[in-house]
Amino acid sequence: RTDMEETEFDDILDDWFIESLKTYKDLHVYQLEHPTQVIEWTSGKTVCVAGFTSSKNEILELRLPLKLFADENKGLCAERDFKVVHGGFTDAPVRFSNCLNLQVWDLGGDDSDVIRRTGSVDGSRGVSEGGSRIAARLSSQPQVLHGAESAGVRLTQLTSGQTVYTLETDSADPLSSLHFVSDAVFLAGCSNGKVYIADTRTSAAPQLSPPPPSSGESVLWWTDASAGPSCLDPSSCRIVRLSSCGQTVISDLRNPGGAVSRAQLDVQTRRCNADDVRVSWAPALDDCIAVSGFSGAVQIYSSSVWTTELQEAQPLFEHRGHAVSSQSDDGVPVFVTSHVWHPERPRTLLSAASDGSVHVWDWVDQSAAGC
Amino acid sequence: MTEDGSIIEGQTQSYTHPSTNWTPSACLWCHFITSNNAALSTPLFYVGQESSGLPIVHHSKYVCDLPPNHRFPMGKFSRVLHFLIKDQVITEKQVWVPEIASIDLLSCVHTEEYLSNFINGKINEQEQRRTGFPWSEGIVRRCRYETGGTVLAAEVALQRGMACSTAGGTHHAFPSYGSGYCLLNDLAVAAKYLISSPKRKVLIVDLDVHQGDGTAFIFKDESCVFTFSVHCGKNFPLRKQQSDLDISVEDGLEDKEYLSTVEAHLPWVLETFRPDLVLYDAGVDPHWEDELGRLSLTDQGLYQRDLYVMKTVVSRGVPVAAVIGGGYSRDIDKLAIRHSIVHRAATQVWRECGM
């Protein structure tokens, strides 16, 4: 990297910094030693991240900068930085795929800063390329829904290791995600675009929704399900399906085959793996969807303006921080590996990228309508 | 001069003491001033009843309207004056009102093209983005008043020994473009204006948490101006210029170490450079509560810093003009009180030095 390149890079960062003063309410960055594909909230202020190399990986629990949460009284809070609260190591890559044995981790109490593995659950029976997906059950009994394919999805009780439910399907479709939409109802999103909806309380066959019509073979699909205003009412749940060419379909859980609305998203088509892309409903912002993994940006869309006609949609907001601040030495552009919405703060997200950066950001909605 | 004080090009600048009501009742220093370069629209200033207090420079037009929710704390300038008067640090009689900086005056630092585009609203989108401000006539006006204010503070300091503006410190402005909330470089204009005739040396002490990159660039080949900046390395701008003396400090630096850093350099710079005037940028963004700054100074720390700088300068018989510099907070009143620390410290020095 020459002096001139360094100067130009600094200039770009300076430009972006000034712009960010207007486009973000808050923005904090952190650098991990190794990139993560996993960001999981462990409390309103802490997240777990973990490496995914084939050898030793660090699992960290990070506390977000307290200044982010100070809101009205930002002045009272000095803490600008992320802080490592707990840490531990694992030999396996942690990315909820290529993880044939699910490992259970104890984050340690206040008196320990170590994360220890306390147990494991025997993973999917069928070995597939994708590996297991998991979803934690929203109930008092610690249970985990897991599987790599539709035919192998099981609900396992963590303490006993017992299987309390198995999804019965005809075909073994590789999964891209599992989501609980209520205490007992879950959705299995397959990477071929099929969606299964099942109730763990019954032995009835799951409801199957075929993939949305799309052009081209080898199109991958990703899914997310929103909980309605009340988690217990599946009827207010919506499903979003996103394809690797950017086609997006929103359906009602009650009628998963139909389409409430559609859009063609402007995604840079790099060659994506099944693990790269995330699509997620905002938990605290009506109709908003976040998309990442196609590039170095996280895009926020407002689906409220979408219709049943497939039309191009523009993002409401684009977080380009990872792309702007990444110094890619090997010429491979940085891409976002994961993102999550804050469970309560409407416009706060965390995102992680392939260069190890982790950002937490609270974006400013500059549109008149929308989220 | 028109009624609202704006300058019609070609006329001389004038500085009006509020008690005179636009009619000069005495003109004490015009002889001294007219010996300056007349081509630069020589200022005359009119002094009415002499206030024996520390001169404070302020203009209500330091403030302009900004789009709602704009990040820049525009309201702070008038609040600084408000709190100084409310807390009885100063009285209204101490306030000097500047005139708007003329294009002639600004052109000693800024290019003709930039000034023309700036005044006529021809700054393109990308350039506007880099400044952080959408262009408006209001922003042009307020920047010109602010620059006029810093120039007046420098002039008054030369006469009285000390002066403080309630604005100023727009050190990221370069000759042909603005940056980081700075559209015109007030410190550079004041310094440039004062080094020509009579020949003077000006030291710019910039303790804003961000490097004074524009000022450093403007004076890099000027031996009569010494630029000294203490700033946090990781703060904007990442692309640094080269001041005559740059001290880049680490994140989180606190009162004691920060003050030691200033103490380690200011005396020898004064001793070796021997300026005729010091322009002091007393930015409060090194404060731990600052939203953008990455240092950890307290109110006390800022006060001790300002006291130290001004005392050190004044006790060597060198006049000092202070500007408030940068500070970023969504609580405007808290921020304004923080900015008023320099005026309070200056008042203390004014008293102690029997000025």
Image (tube, coloured by chain):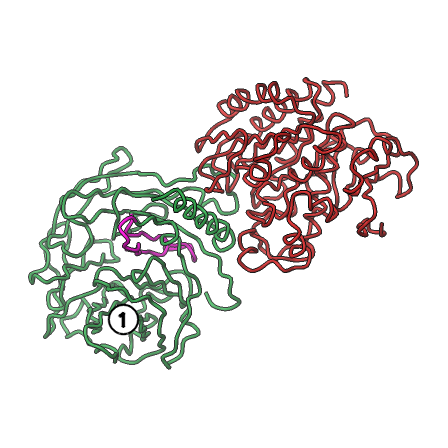
Chain colours: A green, B red
Query: Which residue is nearer to you in this view: B21 or B204?
Result: B204
Residue B326 rendering spot, x and y as whole percentages: 59, 39
Q: How many labels does the image show?
A: 1
Q: Does B192 sit above or below residue A173?
A: above
Query: What chain letter is assigned to the residue under label 1?
Result: A
Q: In which quarter of the image is the C terminus of chain B?
A: top right
Residue at disc 1, secondary structure: strand
Q: Is residue A338 visible?
A: no
Q: Does B203 sit above or below residue A170?
A: above
Q: In this view, does B38 lie to the left or right of A326?
A: right
Which residue is at 31% across, 75% downward? Answer: A251
Residue A77 rendering spot, x and y as whole percentages: 47, 38
Decide whether residue A341 is among the magenta residues: yes
Stretch of the chain drawn in magenta: A329-355
Q: Can residue B54 be seen in this view?
A: yes
Residue A247, quarter of picture: bottom left
Query: Which residue is nearer to you in this view: B107 or B181?
Result: B107
Residue A278, quarter of picture: bottom left
Which residue is at 27% across, 42% downward? Answer: A33
Decide whether residue B148 is among the magenta residues: no
Residue A153 rendering spot, x and y as whole percentages: 14, 64
Q: In this view, does A216 lie to the left or right of B176?
A: left
Question: What residue does disc 1 label?
Answer: A243
Three-letter amino acid code at disc 1? Ser
Q: Does B125 sit above or below residue A114?
A: below
